Amino acid sequence: MNIVDLLNVHIANQPERSAIIDRQFGRDRVITFRQLNERVSAAVTQFRALGLKKGEKILSLLPVSAELYVLLLAAFRAQLVVTLPDPSAGLKRLAQICKSVEPEAIVYSAKGYALRVIASELNDIPLQLCTAQFFPLTHFLNLGGTRGSAESACGDASGTVDVKPCPGSGGDPAAAAIDDVPALLSFTSGSTGEPKAILRTQRFLAAQCRALTSCTVPEPGSVQMVSLPVFVLANIANGVTSVIPDANLKRPAAIQASPVVRQLEKYNCTELLASPAFVQKLVQHCLETGCTLSLVRKIFTGGAPVFCDLVEGASKVFPNAEFEIVYGSTEAEPIAHLPVSRISIHDHEMMRQGRGLLVGELAKGVKAMILAEDSNLQSRMTEAAVARVRAPDLTAGEILVAGDHVVKSYFLDGGGDAVSKVEVNGTVWHRTGDSGFFDERGRLWLLGRSSARVLSAHGTLYPFVVESVARMEPGVQVAALVSTGGGRRTLAVQCRRQDREAVKSNLAKLASRFSIGHIVCLDKLPVDGRHNSKVDYSALARVLHY
């Protein structure tokens, strides 16, 4: 059963329940499951009228909004492929996507239409579509809309739907997506190299939704604020209401928290699913204003390391919430998950002692193994060959994962498979590039990127071993372990200028313990463009001039 099939289930069981709540142009909007289906059906009819054929690719420049999910579901039903650039992608990256993917159609929002003027490659795409009327040189793609404001998160939408399904377009077996038909083309963040294209089929998306659901386990009637786009698809598949934050999701670490808090309170959100940087901004705002969000019962965060200082801050702002860490990557989301309530006093002490970051048990359907660092891995290996390079129990190494929702191959490979995939007796394993180990209870601990570990005369030191301890010190906002000047261990710290001397003093014992020769305090450490939460070690190296 694919996502479109699951949508049909919820249309029948809870047609007037809100599917998506967002805010566009200063107006709150609700779309119910019934309305969502009507818009999807109408969009499928439009695609057919425009001459789009099965397997053709649509490049979407829509923001995260109700219209985006209407487009996705309609494309899935029409067996088209939607290409989603990363929200932080610049013009150069868009030009590369146009050249490599060669989409047959492009969809602009009213705001995104301006890109046609400054990105000539976009004009070369044959079919130009816009979700706003009266834009020159484009066809109007009516993905629907609501009038008025949304006052209830329980399906009581005050607006009406502008489009109606054409006869025979909804529930048409011929229009239903086929499991193995390509559906979604997205890209890795490129934080450790060139972004790689990932092509997901309907079967893959369904498997991913099942795996995500096994981690998040949404409660009946829950209303979930979601800042990570793929999770909205999982919510649609599960009949859960998604609230899209009133924020610029291109820069999670720079959002304005007040409008988001307003949404959480207005729509009685019971769950929050967001990147660590997004959660951190909410926590900072609420601590500064004295606000608590007691209705939120669950918080899920991932996509970047989750350190203890964030968990402690969130516990004050969300006093009734269970906090859950979800570990994964673009190629394998999720891999592992950990309810914070299961972190024992002993676990906390181990993290304070520098054991790394605990991320918990493997998600349902995931297999994982730890291989010795810098192993000579081939694209195809026997089980015996892999056994020879497996890391001993409780020993650190590179994490490899496999499963139905783990990407088997990159689209337009470009050498990515040779570097990141290992086939063992018919099973394709993905090299995460992360280092870690399984503890005595079979739980996974993270140590950081394998490429970021520091090799020196003192031995091997993993980033999270030091960074997780450093972030527990007062005044430390972000920390990063790097190697400078012939393997010298250096700790770079982000903190306020007035706190620098105190921070250095507080970190002196840590530096001595881990043979760190230098502590550098900076106003800001560079982070990844997608989640704004992961330290960009390459960019930091340029800042430190080594």
Image (tube, helix red, strand yellow):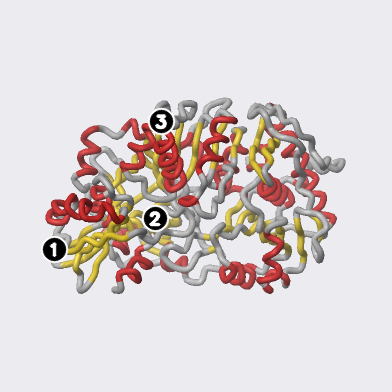
Q: Is residue 324 left or right of residue 210?
A: left
234 vs 206, nearest the viewer? 234
Residue holding disc 2: 534
Q: Is residue 204 left or right of residue 325?
A: right
Mark 2 residue element: loop
14 vs 137, nearest the viewer? 137
Mark 3 residue element: strand
Residue type (three-letter) at the residue carrying disc 1: His
Counting the numbered discs, the total is 3
Residue holding disc 1: 458
In this view, the residue farthest toward the right is 167
Q: CA distance from mark 3 to mark 2?
A: 23 Å
Residue depicted at 78% across the width and 47% down the height: 174
Closer to the N terminus: mark 3 or mark 2?
A: 3
Snapshot quadrant of residue 111: bottom right
Q: Classify mark 3: residues with Cα within 10 Å, few (<14), some (14-19) or many (20+).
A: some
Q: Classify mark 1: residues with Cα within 10 Å, few (<14), some (14-19) or many (20+).
A: few
Residue depicted at 21% across the width and 66% down the height: 455
Above or below residue 471? Residue 343 is above
Q: Nearer the viewer, mark 2 or mark 1?
A: 2
Q: Are marks 2 and 1 in contact (CB under 8 Å)?
A: no
Measured as percent of width and height from the top left, residue 294 is found at: 46, 26
Closer to the N terminus: mark 3 or mark 1?
A: 3
Measured as percent of width and height from the top left, residue 59 is found at: 67, 61
Measured as percent of width and height from the top left, residue 214 is found at: 48, 36
Q: Quadrant of the C terminus?
A: bottom left
Residue holding disc 3: 322
Q: Classify mark 2: residues with Cα within 10 Å, few (<14), some (14-19) or many (20+).
A: many
Above or below residue 410? Residue 401 is above
Snapshot quadrant of residue 132: bottom right
User: Does any portion of residue 178 appear in the rendered image?
Assistant: no
Q: Quadrant of the N terminus?
A: top right
